[in-house]
Each structure stands twice: as C-alpha cells, then as structure tokens.
Amino acid sequence: MTKQRSRLLEILLQAPAHRITAMPDEDYGLADVEPFPFLAIVGQHEMKLALILSIINPRVGGVLLIGPRGTAKTTAVRSLTDLLPQVERSLCVYGCTEEMLEAGGMDAICEECAKKVGYGEALSVVDRVRIMELPLNSRLDDVVGGINERIALEQQRVRLERGILGHADGHVLYIDEVNLLDDEITDAILDAAAQGHFTVRRGPLKLRYRARFLLIGSMNPEEGRLRPQLMDRFGLRALVRGLDDSDLRFQAYEAAMAYKRDPEGLASAYAEGTLALAEEIQAAIHLLPQVEIGEAARALGLRLVKSIEIDSSRAEITLFEAARAHAAADARTVVEPGDIQMVAMMALRQRQSPSLKQFFTEQAAEDAQMESLFAQHFSDKT
C-alpha cells in the first residue's frame, strides 16, 4: 500500500506554479507591502522543509541557509510572515508579561506594569509571531539594549530599554549574511541564544529581559566562513543551490516578474494554499507535544550519529526534534525511521570537526606516551 503524505507536505510539494502564468500585466499602483508567497518559491524543497520544521518545533534550534546569491534565501524567510503561529506579546517596553508575574510576583515586573495589574489591565496580548531582521550595520546597543537617549535628553532621567534581542523574544530573529557579523554582536547573540535571556548593565543600572527566539541565518560561503561557535547554534543546515532544470528556472523568472508587477495580486493567487498551509502548521504545533520517538527511529538516529563520530550532543537534539516535527507535519504521534531519513542530512551536516578529531588523535598518542612513562615510575620500588 502506498503511504499517504500529510496535507501539509502535499501543499508544500505541489504548489500551483501554473497560477503565475495567469497573472495580469496591469500595474495597479500598489506598494510592495505583501511578502512573496512561500508557495510561489520554485523548487528548493530542502530549504522550505527546514523552515517549516523549525516553525513547528523551535526546539530544532533554528536554521542556517547556505548558498550563493540569488537563490531565494532571504525571500523564503520573509515569505514565512503569513505562515507564523500566534504568540503572547508584551505591551511593556521591558517585556513584562502575566507569566513573569505568576513566576516571580510583583518584584518580577516593572512599576508601570504593577500599576496595570492593580487596575486589572492586561500586560500582554496574543499576536502573530513576527520576523525581526537584524541589520549588519546594527550597533551593539541596538542589539542588546541600552540607555534611551531621547528620554534622557527630554525628561532628564535615565532608563534602560531592550534591544533587538529583547524585542525578538517569542519571535523569529533573522540575520542575513550572518557570517559577516561583528564579533561582539555575535557574542551577544550566542549568550542570549544559550541562556534565553540577556542582561544589560550600564553603570549602576541593570536590566534583564527574556530573549527566546527562533534564530534563522543565511550566508554565501563565498564571502567567508561562519564562526564555529555560532555555526553550532543553528540546528538545521540547508544547502540552497541554483535550480538545475531549465523549466523550473523559467518558472522562477515568471514568479519574480509577476511579483514585481503586482505583489498583492500574486499573494491573492496563492492565498488559498497559504491559508491551508498555515492551518496545517498550526495543527502540527498542537500535535507536537504528543509525538514520541519510536524504538526503530531511536536506534537508527543513534547509529547515524555514532557512525559519523559527532561529539556534540546537539546532534541528537536537532535530529530527534526535527524528526518529531516531521512526524507532526504528517499527522502522526510516533516518529518512524522515515522521519529520521528525511531530516538526517539537514540535522547532521557540517557537525563533524576534522580539526577536533585530529586534536583527540594527537592527544591520545601523547596520553599513551605519558601513561607508559608513569607506569615505569609507579612500578619502580626504589
């Protein structure tokens, strides 16, 4: 019996590219406010699957898109806008929420929010997850936060505010050309990604805010390598190559031209499929907590990690969490070997470290020599 794909995967694999050719040529004078439809991206199945799985299960650890210029990496990330789920968003500049109030009491929220609680006002609202882009020219204070200069000048008082990392809490943080980031900003992102929060200190002032975000990066390997510390923070690594098939390349051209002529018209042509895909993603998110790793999938995943000699335990985390997301997308509650097979390359790619392997080999030889010398002294009775 042929195995049936989930509706989500069917939508992803069978995007109606023929709709592009039916787009009108008229220019209605509309601004380019609509993102390029995710389903209108031609080919690039690995990239699209990696992004969808990371939305379903942020514990995958984010996505790094690696490929040359002009392969729709940035377009694909921005096109996720209409597919993202709902999230609780703070109404406070310090990021105070009802969750913080329940966990730490009044001392955990700012003075203004404490007054809101007294008046029975909400500290947060339910909003759609957003994509926060981190520009390469951002200053460190823009990223981590600092003193609000406007309030300092106008009101003669000093107040610390969150940076981009704080505003990205619960959202997607996207960094294009991530390999070109300044080291100090890279260090701040690594700290926030590892801890889930960040602390800003300016003299006697201190502000600690939550920074739990889904990290998505893209890079062109021709422009330099990514620091190993930041590379390790990305769960899935998707290779984005140029399209080989001439027909697909022409379809990509038609889609690009249709978007330039009429962005809203192109979005409308894919609206039905986009809505269906968004609903399937939301359903997969709700199903995810029930998804467990099957014995056969567990054994296969561990064998794969062992066979390529990966030291980092993040390999298993990424592999099994991505497989759980894939099973949820297929409307199943048990991860099967097929799920492992679908995500293994993206989860385990570039996790080997030849230099680290060489280090341990040389260290083992040195340890063996030292143990031999130690043995002589330990056995010496004089």
Image (tube, grey):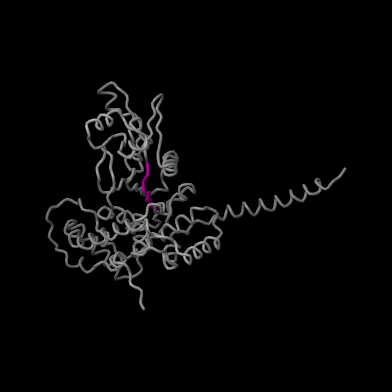
In the depicted view, which residue is nearer to us: 165 or 332?
332
Counting every numbered tag in the picture gives 0
Q: Quadrant of the N terminus?
A: bottom left
Check if residue 218 falls in the magenta segment.
yes
Q: Examine the rendered structure and indicate whether residue 318 appears above or below residue 94.
A: below
In the depicted view, which residue is nearer to us: 292 or 151?
292
What's the magenta bit mostly, secondary-structure-wise?
strand
Q: Position of residue 217 (x, y in %)?
A: 38, 51
Q: Position of residue 235 (x, y in %)?
A: 43, 54
Q: Position of residue 163 (x, y in %)?
A: 34, 37
Q: Residue at x 37, y 41 (%)?
A: 211
Position of 62 compared to 255: left or right? right
Q: Examine the rendered structure and indicate whether residue 147 appears above or below residue 270.
A: above
Q: Examine the rendered structure and indicate whether residue 323 appears above or below residue 199.
A: below
Single out the residue that lies furthest toward the top.
156
Q: Residue at x 38, y 34 (%)?
A: 208
Single out the residue that lies furthest toward the right.
382
Q: Examine the rendered structure and indicate whether residue 265 appears above or below residue 170.
A: below
Provide the residue span drawn in magenta: 211-219
Q: Quadrant of the C terminus?
A: top right
Q: Position of residue 320 (x, y in %)?
A: 45, 59
Q: Residue at x 27, y 27 (%)?
A: 150
Location of residue 43 by image quarter: bottom left
Location of residue 96 by image quarter: top left
Check if residue 280 falls in the magenta segment.
no
Q: Residue at x 47, y 47 (%)?
A: 227
Position of 30 compared to 182: left or right? left
In the depicted view, which residue is nearer to us: 35 or 282?
282
